[in-house]
Image (tube, rainbow, N blue to C red):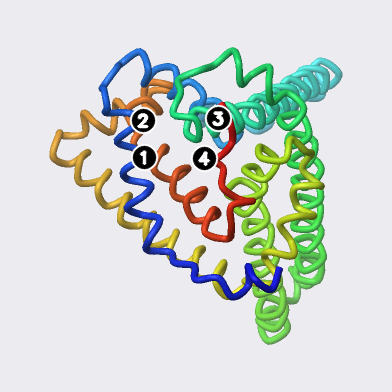
Amino acid sequence: MNEIAVRDVSVIGPISDALAKTKLLLFKPFDISRWFAIGFCAWLTMLAGQGGGFNFYHPSGRGTGVQIGNYIQAHLMLIISLVSAVAAAGVIIMLVFLWLSSRGSFMFLHCVAQNKAEVKLPWRQYRYQGNSLFLFRLIFGLIAFVCLVSICIAFSIPIFVMRHNPQIITIIIIIAVGAPILIILSIGFALVGKFTKDFVVPIMYLRNCGCMAGWKEFLPLLRANIGRFILYILFQIVIGMAISTIVLAAACLTCCIAACLMAIPYIGTVALLPILVFHREYSICYLRQYGSAFDVFAQPG
C-alpha cells in the first residue's frame, strides 16, 4: 500500500485516455444499434436517480375547506387505504428501480471496459455483484435518510415549541449549529455514494466480490491517498460544470430541441451517451493509475 501511496497520480492524464476510449467505443465505427444497446445499460444505471411529480389542484371558493373536511371525515378509511396503497406502490417502484440500477451499473461498466455492446451476458454474469450493490445502497440509503431526518426533527422541535413566542437569537443559534451539521453529513453521504459508483463498483467487477468486500479493499487506498481523492472530487465538479455548459449551449443553439430530446426517457440517455461513457471511462482510467491490480481494462472478456 505504501507503493500505491507514493505513485504518481494525475487527474488530468485520464482525460485523454477517457476521450480516446469513448471515441473507440462509440464512433469507431459508428453503429446506431450499438448506441442503443450501450444506452440501455446506461439508462438502467440512472433509474434510481429518476423521479417525477404531480400537481394537485382544486378550485378555490367559499366553503371549500369545510366541504373537503366533511368529505375526508365521511371517507376516512377509503382515503387511508388509497394513500397506503399509493405509498406501498411507490416504495415497490423505488426498490425495483434501485435494483435495476444496481444491476445496470455492472452492465454499463462491462460494455465500457470490454468495448462491447452486450445486454444479456452482463445481466446474467454480474447478478451477484448487482444484488450486493443493491442491498448496500438500500441499507445505506435508509441510514442516510434516518440520520438526516432525525437531525432535521431534532433542530426543528425547539423552533416549533417557540412558535408562539419566538426568540430570534435562539433560533439563529439553532440554525447556525444545525445547518453545518446537516451540510457536512449530506456531503459525507454523497461522497460515499460517489466513491461507491466510481471505484468500489470497478473493484467488485475485478474481484467478483460483494460491495462490503469492495469497500474493504478500497478504504486503505482511500486513506493512503486522501488528498488525491479530494482533488479527484474537486476536478469532477469542474468537469461537471464544463459539461453542463456544453449541454446548455447545445439546448440554446437548437432552440431547446436538444433539451426536449434529452428529456425523453431512454432516448435522452442515448443522446447523452458520449458524456455518460466519458464519465465512466474517466473514473476507471483514474483508478488504474494506482496499479495493475486496479486496471479494469485488463479484465479478460
What residue does disc 3 label? 110
Numbered disc 1: secondary structure: helix
Residue bearing mark 4: 297
Position of 85 relative to 134 (above/below): above
Badge 3, how many Cα within 10 Å: few under 14, some, many 20+? many
| Image location (x, y in percent) of residue 295 | 56, 47
Q: CA distance from mark 2 to mark 1?
A: 6 Å
Which label sits in the foreground, 1 or 4?
A: 4
Q: Secondary structure at mark 4?
A: helix
Whether residue 63 appears in this view of the structure is no
Asked if disc 2 and disc 1 are in contact, CB closer than 8 Å, the reply is: yes
Question: How much space separates mark 1 and mark 4, taking CA atoms?
Answer: 10 Å
Observer-nearest of 144 and 246: 246
Residue in the image at 68% along x and 28% along y = 94
Q: Identify the element where label 3 is drawn.
A: helix
Please tell me which of labels 2 and 4 falls first in the chain: 2
Residue appearing at x 61%, y 31% in the figure: 106
Front residue (pair 236, 67): 236
Disc 3/disc 1 C-alpha distance (Å): 14 Å
Q: Quadrant of the N terminus?
A: bottom right
* Upstream in sequence: badge 2 or badge 3: 2
Residue flagged by tag 4: what amino acid is it? Answer: Phe
- Say what amino acid the circle numbered 1 marks: Lys
Within-10-Å neighbours for mark 1: few <14, some 14–19, many 20+ = many
| Structural crowding at the residue carrying mark 2, measured as other residues with C-alpha within 10 Å and reported as few (<14), some (14–19) or many (≥20) | many
- Of the 4 image quadrants, the one containing the C terminus is top right
Which amino acid does the dot numbered 3 rest on?
A: His
Which x, y percent locates residue 88?
78, 23
